[in-house]
Image (spheres, rainbow, N blue to C red):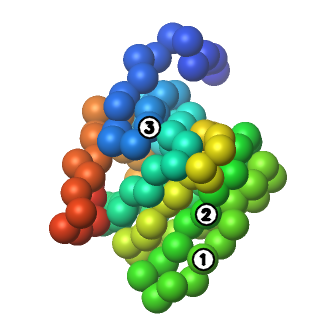
């Protein structure tokens, strides 16, 4: 058994926010856990090609939208799940940051960063 606090890990700037990777591939748990902050008023075009992702909202609000136009509101207590490698838009509301607990399977290494651009979806 072990414990790890958010204050013990460096924050990774991923483009429109930060990510504290609390559990990573090197921990050999078969999944990864991150505390993700999405800055207020931002939109991120994201896609995980190697990982499944589930995000549980712990604070703030926003929405996630797939490429078919299906939009889902995200507020505290809501989990959104990608059961494939769907490209998506992640938006934080204009008035507050969106904070998520993100779970990845298989686990991320922990040093990945998104490269956001208007021309396509950022992947890793």
Could you tell me which residue is drawn at 44 percent across and 57 percent down? Answer: 43
The answer to whether residue 52 shows anywhere in this view is yes
Q: How crowded is mark 2: few (under 14 residues within 10 Å), some or many (20 or more)?
A: some
Marks 3 and 1, how far apart at CA: 21 Å
Label 2 residue SS: strand
Residue that mark 3 sits on:
17
**Residue closest to the far top:** 8
Whether the residues at callouts 1 and 2 have beta carbons within 8 Å, the answer is yes
**Residue closest to the far bottom:** 68
Q: How crowded is mark 1: few (under 14 residues within 10 Å), some or many (20 or more)?
A: some
Residue that mark 2 sits on:
63
The first of marks 3 and 2 along the sequence is: 3
Rendered-image quadrant of the N terminus: top right
Disc ID at residue 71: 1
Q: At which x and y percent is residue 38? A: 51, 43
Q: At which x and y percent is residue 66? A: 48, 78
């Amino acid at each position: 058994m072990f414990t790890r606090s958010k204050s013990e890990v460096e924050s990774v700037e991923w483009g429109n926010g930060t990510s504290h990777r609390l559990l990573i591939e090197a921990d050999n748990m078969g999944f990864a856990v991150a505390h993700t902050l999405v800055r207020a008023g931002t939109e991120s075009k994201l896609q995980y090609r190697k990982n499944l992702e589930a995000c549980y909202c712990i604070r703030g609000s926003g929405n996630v939208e797939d490429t078919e136009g299906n939009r889902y509101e995200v507020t505290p207590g809501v989990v959104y799940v990608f059961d494939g490698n769907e490209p998506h838009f992640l938006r934080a509301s204009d008035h507050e940051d969106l904070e998520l607990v993100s779970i990845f399977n298989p686990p991320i290494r922990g040093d990945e960063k998104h490269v956001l651009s208007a021309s396509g979806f950022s992947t890793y």
